[in-house]
Image (cartoon, helix red, strand yellow):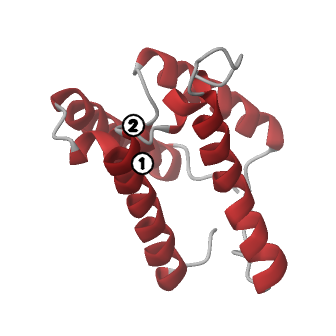
Amino acid sequence: MTEFTPFASFLGGTLIGLAAVLLMALHGRIAGMTGILSGLIPPTAPDWTWRLAFLAGAVAAPALITGFGGYAIPFHSGVPAPWLVVGGLIVGIGVHFGAGCPSGHSVCGIARLSRRSITATLVFMASTAVTVFIVRHVLGGLS
């Protein structure tokens, strides 16, 4: 189980929101990671440089905080690695058919009052609640 980290979570959420607002305000772009990544592979879009910089920052910032700040969030998963891979593939399929990732729809789409993003976020949240209920109370948890 992941440790409760209110300060780090608040700071991380604030930085994500700030990055989304700045990217929209300064460049007129939506900070959805799926859209940013899809414009980079292969780098054929004329604006691939900002996409690469944004993704590099998303990877480098946590690495710098962990490396130089001596701060890391301890994480342990009781789920076997093959299940994580299968889960990642299922999420990737959902991202494709949902026209974006859950975080992009919820952080950026709701902020733009997009009906599609609001609907998608409600479906994601309901699906998550049902899945957690089934795993914990019907299947007896994963230990």
Q: Which residue is mark 1?
A: 23
Residue 41 picture location, percent across and down: 69, 20
Above or below residue 44? Residue 86 is below
Residue 32 picture location, percent across and down: 45, 38
For the C terminus, the quadrant is bottom right
- The answer to whether the residue labelled 1 contacts the one labelled 2, judged by CB atoms less than 8 Å apart, is yes
**Residue at figure coordinates x 25%, y 39% from the top left:** 122
Residue 8 picture location, percent across and down: 54, 79
Judge left or right: residue 6 versus residue 61: left
Given the image, on which type of amino acid does mark 2 rest? Answer: Arg
Judge left or right: residue 42 versus residue 67: left
Given the image, on which type of amino acid does mark 1 rest? Answer: Leu
**Residue at figure coordinates x 68%, y 64% from the top left:** 61
**How many numbered discs sit on the rendered protein?**
2
For the N terminus, the quadrant is bottom right
Judge left or right: residue 139 versus residue 65: left
Label 1 secondary element? helix
Above or below residue 32? Residue 141 is below
Q: Which residue is mark 2?
A: 29
**Residue at figure coordinates x 41%, y 20% from the top left:** 99
